[in-house]
Image (cartoon, rainbow, N blue to C red):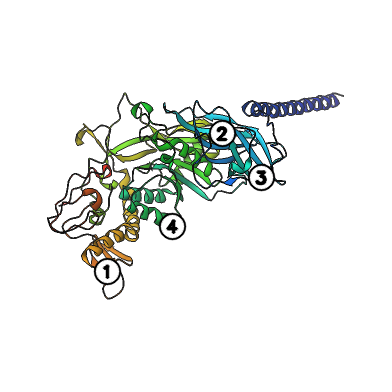
């Protein structure tokens, strides 16, 4: 009898537990639906005259709308908070009040229109234009492949630019790490440091680097072309100055233009969504920054350890440390590299000390599927927590002009962490230089000296280049002996009267050099002897 009673009690308890679990699950589902409805009001579809999908396919990275206050980058499917299309764009924070998504619904190719939620990112830094998410809940019974954005729910679809909605199909990760380099601008010519950063990224485990390119030198174009053909670099054209007055400063008070730092924040957000389904991690840093692991050989083992220690975290912040390019060491003064414009990072191993009153900025390695919006040094909206990675685990090696320029060398901290990669780095950089920069520089010298062009760089030895395989092949210096310019165009040699040499030709042996170099990327390099 007692045994039967216990069975009865157990049955009741099981039923109660099951009921509680069921109610909790139902409530959670309802709560999620309520959250989605609050964030994205129910889609009110308007069929403008039963129009079929048409419009002009968008051809460019940046597409202005008719109002010239809204600029569309790209739409992405986002099902993390309901089925929405999230359009990355740039808008005027006051003038743009209302936008609509014109969806091309499949399979009948009918247009349905919903009102957008315009979410201007909070980190605008005083500029009138800023990054924005233009978010539309997708209509029911609509599987849109394309969308157009318009200021009104009415109009002619033929006149609207049409954008493909990316990320609609789930993909398996094709790479572990993608680096996003936003806004290469100012006729960028820091060629040597860019190549060194690229090769360091590859050593650390990067398979893809996305560069938002505004402008760079012809020599830099050759390097980018090499990495594109290799499959490492993806170039996103970024002609933002064709549409807005851009600033190279981070805050409006420093330079009163339309948008800050060449639209860097917009580019970073686009890069996250562009790689959300194809990269396990996305790294947000500049071309002169390298996240150096100090306890692990590469990023893969470092991130595996960090994730194991911090389950549920998808944002990892690394502290930035300045290694001034004005303080150098004679170690790794590789003669062939002296002909290449830019900074040799192996020669800059003195770190600025921390300042009590200043917080070092950070850059990030993120799980893109956990990020909704990002700024430069932190995320604005995300799922889960952020982790500040201790400096003894990793730091950002940032070789640039000093922030504490008044400090003598003795006050800096000698930090040779980078040197543990020197053997692989030197070998890899030399391979790239042989196929890009040195051959290009030799070709300029050859035209000036009446020598044949360099048909193919074969070997590199003590700064000399092996060009060609025919009867005229042989060892040659990329520039005339005794000059060793870092960059002919930027160091502006003063030629002797009557030589007739142009600014872009190799200098004669007797040329004297205009020093210091005028290109900031070359400041701190060793002057030619």
Mark sitting earlier along the chain (1/4): 4
Residue 18 location, x and y as percent? 76, 29
Which residue is under mark 3?
53
Which residue is under mark 4?
230
Q: How packed is label 4: few (under 14 Cα within 10 Å), some, or many (20 or more)? A: few
Q: Tell which tag, 2 or 3, sits nearer the viewer.
A: 3
Cα gap from disc 2 to disc 1, whole angstroms: 56 Å
Q: Nearer the viewer, residue 193 or 160?
A: 160
Labelled pair 1, 4 in contact (Cβ < 8 Å):
no
Q: Tell which tag, 2 or 4, sits nearer the viewer.
A: 2
Tell me the residue at 53%/51% (across/down): 174
Does residue 518 lie above or below 427 as drawn? above
Mark sitting earlier along the chain (2/4): 2
Cα gap from disc 1 to disc 3, whole angstroms: 57 Å
Q: How packed is label 2: few (under 14 Cα within 10 Å), some, or many (20 or more)? A: many
Q: Which mark is residue 134?
A: 2
Residue 280 location, x and y as percent? 52, 44
Tell whether 524 sits left or right of 226. Answer: left
Q: Secondary structure at mark 4?
A: helix
Q: Is residue 469 visible?
A: yes
Labelled pair 1, 3 in contact (Cβ < 8 Å):
no
Q: Which mark is residue 287?
A: none
Labelled pair 2, 3 in contact (Cβ < 8 Å):
no
The total number of labels drawn is 4
Residue 74 location, x and y as percent? 54, 41
Cα gap from disc 2 to disc 3, whole angstroms: 20 Å
Which residue is under mark 1?
452
Does residue 84 lie above or below 298 as drawn? above
Cα gap from disc 1 to disc 4, whole angstroms: 27 Å
Residue 79 location, x and y as percent? 63, 37
């Amino acid at each position: 009898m007692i045994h039967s009673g216990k069975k009865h009690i157990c049955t009741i308890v099981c039923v109660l537990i099951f009921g509680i679990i069921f109610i909790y699950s139902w409530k959670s589902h309802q709560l999620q639906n309520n959250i989605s409805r609050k964030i994205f009001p129910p889609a009110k579809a308007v069929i403008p005259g039963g129009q079929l999908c048409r419009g002009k396919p968008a051809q460019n990275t940046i597409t202005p709308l008719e109002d010239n206050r809204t600029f569309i980058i790209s739409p992405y499917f986002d099902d993390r908070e309901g089925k929405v299309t999230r359009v990355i764009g740039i808008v005027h924070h006051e003038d743009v009040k209302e936008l609509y998504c014109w969806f091309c619904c499949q399979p009948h190719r009918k247009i349905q229109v919903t009102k957008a939620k315009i979410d201007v990112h909070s980190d605008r830094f005083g500029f009138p234009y800023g990054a924005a998410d233009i978010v539309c809940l997708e209509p029911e019974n609509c599987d849109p492949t394309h969308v157009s954005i318009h200021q009104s729910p009415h109009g002619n679809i033929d006149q609207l630019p049409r954008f493909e909605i990316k990320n609609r199909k789930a993909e398996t990760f094709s790479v572990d790490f993608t680096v996003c380099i936003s806004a290469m601008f100012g006729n960028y010519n820091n060629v040597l440091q860019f190549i060194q950063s690229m090769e360091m990224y590859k050593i650390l485990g990067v398979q893809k680097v996305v560069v938002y390119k505004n402008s760079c030198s012809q020599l830099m174009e050759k390097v980018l072309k090499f990495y594109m053909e290799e499959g490492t670099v993806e170039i996103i054209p970024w002609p933002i100055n064709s549409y807005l007055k851009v600033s190279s400063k981070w805050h409006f008070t420093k330079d009163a233009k339309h948008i800050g730092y060449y639209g860097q924040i917009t580019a970073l957000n686009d890069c996250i969504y562009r790689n959300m389904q194809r990269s396990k991690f996305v790294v947000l840093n500049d071309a002169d920054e390298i996240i150096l692991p100090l306890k692990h050989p590469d990023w893969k083992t470092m991130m595996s350890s960090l994730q194991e220690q911090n389950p549920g975290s998808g944002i990892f912040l690394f502290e930035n440390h300045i290694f001034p390019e004005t303080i150098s060491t004679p170690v790794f003064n590789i003669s062939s590299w002296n002909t290449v414009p830019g900074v040799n990072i192996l020669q800059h191993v003195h770190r600025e000390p921390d300042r009590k009153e200043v917080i070092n900025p950070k850059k990030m390695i993120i799980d893109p599927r956990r990020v909704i919006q990002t700024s430069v040094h932190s995320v604005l909206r995300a799922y889960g927590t952020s982790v500040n990675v201790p400096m003894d685990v990793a730091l950002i090696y940032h070789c640039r002009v000093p922030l504490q320029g008044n400090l003598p060398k003795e006050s800096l901290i000698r930090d040779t962490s980078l040197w543990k990669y020197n053997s692989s780095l030197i070998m890899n950089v030399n391979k790239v230089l042989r196929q890009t920069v040195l051959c290009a520089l030799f070709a300029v010298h050859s035209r000036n000296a009446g020598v044949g062009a360099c048909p193919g760089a074969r070997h590199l030895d003590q700064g000399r280049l092996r060009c060609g395989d025919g009867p005229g092949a042989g060892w040659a210096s990329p520039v005339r002996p005794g000059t060793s310019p870092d960059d002919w165009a930027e160091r502006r040699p003063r030629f002797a009267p009557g030589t007739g040499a142009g600014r872009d030709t190799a200098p004669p042996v007797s040329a004297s050099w205009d020093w210091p170099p005028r290109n900031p990327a070359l400041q701190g390099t060793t002057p030619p002897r």
